[in-house]
Structure formats: structure tokens, C-alpha cells
Image (spheres, rainbow, N blue to C red):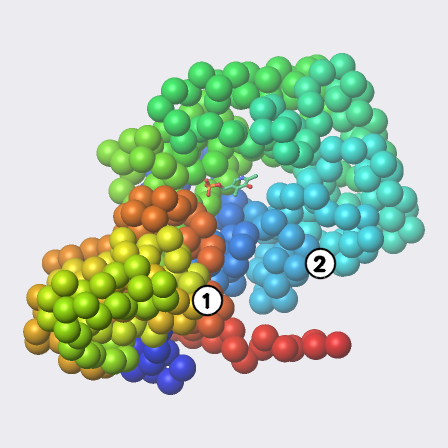
Amino acid sequence: MEDIKLRHCRRAVVQVSLDAITANLRAMKALLPEKTAMLAVVKADGYGHGAVPVAKAAEPFVAGFGVATLQEGIALRRHGLGGIILILGVTFPEDYEEMVRWQLRPAIFERDHAEKLSGLARKLKREIPIHLAVDTGMSRIGMKPGGQAEQLAEEIYHMPGLRVEGIFTHFSRADEEDKECTRQQFQKFMEFTDRLRQKGIEIPLRHCSNSAAMIENFSSNSLELCRAGISMYGLYPSDQVNRELVKLTPALSLKSRISCIRTIGPGTAVSYGGTFVADRTMTIATIPVGYGDGYPRNLSGKGCVLIRGKRAPVLGRICMDQFMVDISKIPEAVEEDEAVLIGSQGEETITVEELADLGGGFHYEILCDLGKRIPRVYRKDGRIVGIKDYSWDQYEDFL
Ligand SMILES: *Cc1c(COP(=O)(O)O)cnc(C)c1O
């Protein structure tokens, strides 16, 4: 059955191929030495794909998951996901009890936070696993390698109730052709962790690689753990990453339908601001999706959609919930026809990268911004295996 004909999906639908997710994970795993495990990064609701279904599909291939917030971690646990769940950002001490209850791992790099957590471990009489964050060049979070950081790491290591399960850093420029910065970051990290080892501080899981470093076969791939984000969803981190090294398949497509067709004469303006004015008789179609769904407004007058296997260019400004396209060259189009905004139709394909380039946007951001007004439909072996309709639980726990 066509997903676009499903209840609640008639206006717009995001389709996610779980087969693509698992194929991408297999391909990424094949880049790594046997002993290196992966974390599947499912922050920001799995880069807009839906964190829980993606995590469930990824579970057989990974040691755990990377999330950005406490709530994202809890959502995974509530749905029964096991393994390591690492909160990649800072968790505030007020949230420690809840974090421990759900067995989520915090990124720790400040004495004060470690002491509070150690106090909690004593109170709860349980061991709390943590990962140390190291800042080797992002200037975002983490301890900066050096004498003070060594001492701090040593203190934390010996704090009662804490178990330092992992230590990690994040590359700022691994997706660039020039790998000099990445090499320097990695060197800083290795010198730091090696010195800790010399002091008897054995940390089982060291991890640095994001998708770009994994694809470019960076030295950090032979540590114990890597963190795969964008590659799992089938996109390359940037156009400077060598696509020959791994074959990735985009998992997501975005489909809508023509809601209205009309003919306009010369001199007729289209959409807000009248930025497009027809210079001849044209046939135009309205697509019931807009920036309120995360379809970037900067595609105004630039984007296009696929109708009947052909490209229909966007006319004028993208509105909050609708936009218009030129179908003068697609006379066979009728109302309710499928319009593909991201993905393939016939021989044609519109990629997220193409939209990012056209609008001067960023491909990761376009995925993350896809609105919760659009239901997600999950497919596996050609069959629908689940639907996530965010409109149902939006006001759950409303106070
Ligand atoms: C988001 C993130 C990742 C994943 O990055 P990709 O480029 O999507 O693979 C890995 N590690 C950290 C710390 C992150 O914040």
C-alpha cells in the first residue's frame, strides 16, 4: 500500500527504510577492526528519523547509543533498549538521580560534578558508570589535556562509587580533506590517555571517531569504540569525505501530494511578497507542506519536487504550511498526485544534500528540522512495520 494513502499520512509522510539503516551499519562496521564496537548516535530524535525505531533496528550491531539529553536517553530505556547509553552533552546535577535510575552514562569533566555524583553513589549504594570528556580542539565540553586534567582524571578515577567506563573526545574537522587538525586532536587524546595508563588508570572504552573519521579510516578507529551518526542514516558527513570508501543509502524520504492545481495568466503573482510573477500562462500546483514542517524557507524560488517522475520547480516563497510549484511541463499531473520532496520517483532523485546546497543550508539540520507534524512510517523487507504519529502523544504529561 502507498504510505501516503494511510490515515494521518495523506498530506505528508516521512518514510524511513530500516533496511537502509541496517545496511549502512553493516557497511560502517566493515570499516572497523573486529574488536572495535560502535555506538549508534540517535540524538535529536535520531536525526529526525525517530530515535526509538532506529535504535531498535541498530541494536544488534552496536554496543549502545549516543544521545544529547537525559530525556532522549530515558525514551530509549522506556522502550527497552539496553547497552550503554551515553549522554554526549552535559547533564546538570539536578538530573543525576533520574539519570542513574535509568542507567544512563554522563559525560564528566568537572570535579564538582564528579563529587556530586560520587556522593549520590554512596547514598544509593550503587556504582555509577561515567565517561570522561576530553577537549582536544572543539572548545565545547571536556577537560583540556595537561597536568591539571591528569590530576583531575586521577581524582575522579579514585572517587568512591564511580566507575570510569569510557573516555572520549570529539573531532572538529574530520570531515575536511586536510586531516592535520584531526591528527593533532587524536595525538593529544592518545598522549593524555597513555599518561593516565602509566599512572594505573585503566579506562576500558576509549572513543573519538565520528562518521567522517570512521569513513576516512582514521587511526582512532582501532580504539575500543566509535560513534556513528549521519552515516547510519545514509548521508556522508560532507562533500570532502571520499564516497568511494563506503556505500551509504539514505534511509529517509519525504512525500506529499498535490492539494490544488490551477492555471495562471501572465502578470499573476505567486505567494507572499509576489516575488514570482508569471510572464506567460502557467499551470501551478500547491503542495501542502511548508517551513512549519521543516521544509526550509530558504528554498523559496530555488527548490523543486518530483511529480510523475519529473522536476517541478518551487515558485515564490515557501509558506508555513504550503508552497507552489510549476507543473507547466507536467500536463498529466492531477490533484492528489504524489509529490516527492526528498527521495526518488521514477528515474529522478532529490537528496537532502541537494536541498542543503540549493538553499545554503546544512544537510544534518534539514533532517533534524523535519517537523513532528509529519508522521514517520517505518519499512522493513518492503513491509510497514510501524508508524510514529507525534500528534497523539504531544500533550502527554501536560501539567
Ligand atoms: C553528533 C555526534 C556524533 C556523531 O557525528 P556524525 O558526524 O553524525 O557521525 C559523534 N560524537 C559526538 C560527541 C556527537 O556530538
Task: Give the image location of residue 185, x and y in percent.
Answer: 54, 21
Q: Which residue is mark 1?
A: 292
For the residue pair 127 and 384, the one nearer the viewer reads as 384
Most extreme residue toward the front is 267
**Callout 2: SS:** loop
For the residue pair 257 and 219, the one nearer the viewer reads as 257
Q: Are marks 2 and 1 in contact (CB under 8 Å)?
A: no
For the residue pair 270 and 90, the one nearer the viewer reads as 270
- Name which residue lies at 60% across and 23% down: 136
Instruction: Name the residue type under label 1.
Output: Gly
Name the image quarter holding residue 208: top right
Q: In the displayed structure, does residue 222 sit left or right of residue 167?
A: left
Q: In the displayed structure, does residue 377 sit left or right of residue 134?
A: left
Up-down relation of residue 135 to residue 298 (above or below)? above
CA gap, disc 2 to disc 1?
A: 33 Å
Q: Which residue is mark 2?
A: 102
Q: Give the crowd class for mark 1: few <14, some 14-19, many >=20 residues within 10 Å.
A: some
- Name which residue lies at 58% across and 67% down: 79
Q: Image quadrant for the C terminus?
A: bottom right
The answer to whether residue 380 of the structure is visible from this angle is: no
Name the image quarter holding residue 313: bottom left
Up-down relation of residue 391 to residue 216 (above or below)? below
Instruction: Name the residue type under label 2.
Output: Trp
Q: Image quadrant for the N terminus?
A: bottom left
| Cβ at disc 1 under 8 Å from ligand 1 | no
- Name which residue lies at 24% across and 34% down: 244
Q: Earlier in the sequence, mark 2 or mark 1?
A: 2
Task: Give the image location of residue 309, x and y in percent.
Answer: 13, 65
The answer to whether residue 130 of the structure is visible from this angle is: yes
Q: Give the crowd class for mark 2: few <14, some 14-19, many >=20 residues within 10 Å.
A: some
